[in-house]
Amino acid sequence: MTAELIHRLHFAFTVTFHYLFPQLTMGLALLIVVLKSVALKTGDAKWDQAARFWGKIFGINFVFGVVTGIPMEFEFGTNWARFSRLSGGVIGQPLAMEGVFSFFLESAFLGLFLYGEKRLSKLMHWFSAVMVFVGSWISGFFIIVTDAWMQHPVAYDRLPNGQFEVLSFWQLLLNPWALLQYAHNMTGAVITGSFVMSAVGAFYLLDDRNPVYARIFLKVGVIAGLVSSILIIFPTGDLHGKYLAKNQPAAIAGMEGVFKTETGAGMVLIGQPNEETGEIDNPIVVNDLLSFLIYGTTQAEVKGLDQIPRDQWPTALPLLFYAYHIMAGLGTWFVLLMTVAAFLLWRGRLAGARWALWALLLSFPLPYIANTAGWMTAELGRQPWLIYGLMRTSEGYSNTVSASNGLFTLIGFMGLYLLLGLLFTVLIYREISHGPEPAYAG
Amino acid sequence: MMGFVWFWLVAVMIVGYVVLDGFDLGVGVMHLFICRDETERRATLASIGPVWDGNEVWLLAGGGTLYFAFPLLYASAFSGFYLPLMIVLWLLVLRGISVELRNHIDVGVWRALLDGVFGLSSGLLTIFFGAALANVLRGVPLQADGYFFLPLWTNWQPGPHPGILDWYTVIGGVVALVALTLHGALWLTLKTSGDLAERTRRVAGPLSIQLAVLTVISLGATIHVRPESLDNYFNYPFTFIVPVGVVASLAGIWLFNRARQPLKAFLSSCLYLFFMLAGACWGLYPTLLPATTGMDRDITLAKALSGPHTLAVGLVWWAFGMTLAVGYVVFVYTKFKGKVDMETAGH
């Protein structure tokens, strides 16, 4: 294996594992604010107790997010030194801002939220929950700004020594790519949060315990789940996809499996891209749909990979195609499931519909898969570029760190993260088995 | 001018990190030896529970600041110190997990295991951080392209081809271990009560004397390994105030601890760390990473600085953001001020 591949895998593995946690952190943070707000408004102790229960899950999840996040901040330098040396002036900026503006806020108020309930007024405790939410969502924004600049570099100049320099701070932060990706990504995080919350509610009802809390979890989870599942497709996914199609034609061609440029391009629902023959094997295609989705008319021309030089094709074409299709397929399932569940909820029949509860319970891993597949789509679609159009991935990794040194630490991370995964499962299992405490007054 | 400003802003982040995370690392080391039962252990951990995670943020924010202000330094140092940095990351992961999870587990053996992991990883981290700073002070074998790759050790000599560990950097590690263990002991004296606080106080006395001896040794060793470290001091003699501050704060630790004034003793320890780090930075300035392969290869401010617009814009948001951050820190420490309740801690 080449050093380039090892360094890519190193970053990909650690960031993929890391992002299993923040997506729940960010989604749950919003839902906890909802629980605390209802508690504050109605004075109903049940909702406070529900918030406390999710606060515990949040706390465990947050710690795993923090400890797996610290390596990310370092890996830019350790594994991608040549990239960091040139890009630090631009993307070092949002990364540092994440620390300065988000982590301080988040950690301070999480400490207050988890440990300080007795020392704070009800309003202050609610406020702490809001600040944790704000902190975690700001954090997400700066990471997206960082990634968006690599996807779609804006507002930069090159200094004589080759370094990139920011020309406009606001253009960097308000990169259209960042705004679209942020909306799409945060909606994805809310999906994870709401699916997890409704799954726990469904689990309690199926197992015949904590019925009061189970109904609260289902109510909040299903409503938030329905709204976010719709928003992930329209408008966030739709707009992001159109912008991507305009700016990264190679990526969209790879995602959709368009080898040949055509007008009235069909959309491949299922199939296997064959790089040798330049065709999709065993395809199921809906005629004209792709042209319509991207350009709003069935007759538009969609640029295929045949118009793109071979050395600028996404390097892992089938993987890109599968990742994108898994994300899109799961997104469709989310809307279906949550529409049915919301309908049952509205009719007051969800708690008795065991089949629907089973479906909700079993669907909780799917948003994790969809979010991961979405990120793989974005990052594989950018290849072979590290900074789109400006710097190739092969020019960015640390060439002082040999392949086997990289492999050694990659294996180290794999072992450590296996242990973390097991610990996390045990701890969350315990919290869920234990369940919320019975409500008490005051 | 921008170089001067950003050099010291990064230094501020490092001092903030060491002073704050330093005491919870020290508490990690201390709790292995000092706690006699579960109640004491819970109180000890409760004293850092709400704040350790925020303290660690200084490392992240500092790393990010370094990345954008001095990209060359960040790229060169992080890839060059690849192996020890990865070990540091693993230790940080293990430490964070063990401290947070021990309260979720009520099986004694697992708890003991997690406590052991927490103490050991805390201690190793202090040694690594000390050795890391010593590596920077000693210099690394920079190549013409600005990169290097250090093995963990070579012949234990700080010559032109050193390893991460040699006799000098080991001294750095030991100084950090003792300084931060003492820092943690003083924190515990301040935040806990009764028998536990008294025992930590009695440990702090001898530790501060050991630290004084080690400080003198490490200063001598630094001057021996890199005599240029003194240049700035002789060019600006008023800066000898820094070593005077080191001595005064060491005396303060010992005296206030003896006089049972734990807050003043702890603050003296903060000052000690401040003066030691500021003194080290001043000994380097304007070099960021000296080369053992010839002075022309030193990574200097001039070579490593980001573009002018980046730095000017950065100054605005950095000042604004850090003002907010300091506000949160003050707010949290005020909310959790006073001693930990020994009976209800951690429940």
Image (cartoon, coloured by chain):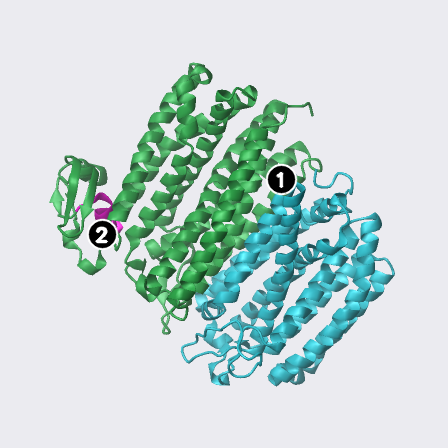
Chain colours: A green, B cyan
Query: Where on the picture, by quarter, is residue A407?
Result: bottom left
Taking the image as drawn, is residue B133 in sight? yes
Q: Residue at x 68, y 23 (%)?
A: A441
Camera-near label (2 vs 1) is 1
Relative image position of residue B63 (x, y in whole percent): 52, 61
- Of the 4 image quadrants, the one containing the C terminus of chain B is top right
Determine whether the residue tagged by mark 2 lies in a helix, strand or loop. Answer: helix
Report the span colored magenta: A246-258
Determine whether the residue tagged by mark 1 lies in a helix, strand or loop. Answer: helix
Q: Can you identify the residue that label 1 sits on?
A: B104
Query: Front-most of B48 and B99?
Result: B99
B56 relative to B3, above or below: above
State the CA–CA distance, disc 2 to disc 1. 49 Å
Q: Please, which chain is the residue tagged with disc 2 on?
A: A
Q: Residue at x 59, y 26 (%)?
A: A47
As for residue A313 lying within the magenta part, the answer is no
Relative image position of residue A395 (x, y in whole percent): 32, 66
Relative image position of residue B185 (x, y in whole percent): 75, 58
Q: Can you identify the residue that label 2 sits on?
A: A250
